[in-house]
Amino acid sequence: MSTTPDAFPGTRLEEEIELTGQNTDPTNIGGLTYRSDTGNFVLKDSLGSFNPRGGGGLPPATEQGQILYSIDGTSFEPYKPVASSGGWLFNNFGLLIVTG
């Protein structure tokens, strides 16, 4: 009786996919990369790159009082707006976001 690679304990080599760590997001739709700098997988679809465990692809706020801001409606960045005395909200570039 001869042995095959299946006779070894553990996962068969053919059943594993090993991605080398890259520190860039995928460039093609349907792409998948493993970010070694963050320890996360990143996927790309028609709306952009996202972490599949990130809860819908929206970035988390990094400090209290931030809002998610988007120019194109598909990619969002956390910003801390500046409020005027009239209650108007401005972004870091001085663009009006919401009037009070």
Image (spheres, rainbow, N blue to C red):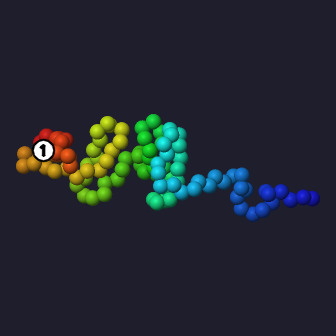
- Could you say whether the residue bearing mark 1 is in a helix, strand or loop? loop
Q: Does the image show residue 80?
A: yes
Please name the residue that numbered disc 1 is placed on.
88
Q: Is residue 27 above or below residue 14?
A: above
Q: Is residue 20 above or below residue 50?
A: below
Q: Give the mark count.
A: 1
Q: Is residue 64 above or below residue 94?
A: below
Task: Name the one closer to the observer, 58 or 24.
Answer: 24
> Percent x, y for residue 34?
52, 54
Task: Name the one closer to the observer, 87 or 94.
Answer: 94
Q: Is residue 16 above or below residue 97?
A: below
Q: Quadrant of the C terminus?
A: top left
Q: Amino acid at mark 1?
A: Trp
Query: What residue do we see at 59% from left, 54% from top?
Result: 19
> Percent x, y for residue 37?
46, 60
Extreme-right residue of the structure: 1
Query: What residue do we see at 78% from left, 62% from top?
Result: 8
Query: What residue do we see at 7% from left, 49% from top?
Result: 85
Is 86 placed left or right of 78 in the picture? left
Extreme-left residue of the structure: 85
> Percent x, y for residue 75?
35, 42
Q: Does the image show residue 52?
A: no
Is 37 placed left or right of 78 in the picture? right
> Percent x, y for residue 57?
41, 46
Q: Quadrant of the N terminus?
A: bottom right
Give the image quarter of residue 49: top left
Query: What residue do we see at 16% from left, 50% from top?
Result: 82
10 Å crowding of disc 1: few (<14), some (14-19), many (20+): some
Is 22 placed left or right of 99 in the picture? right
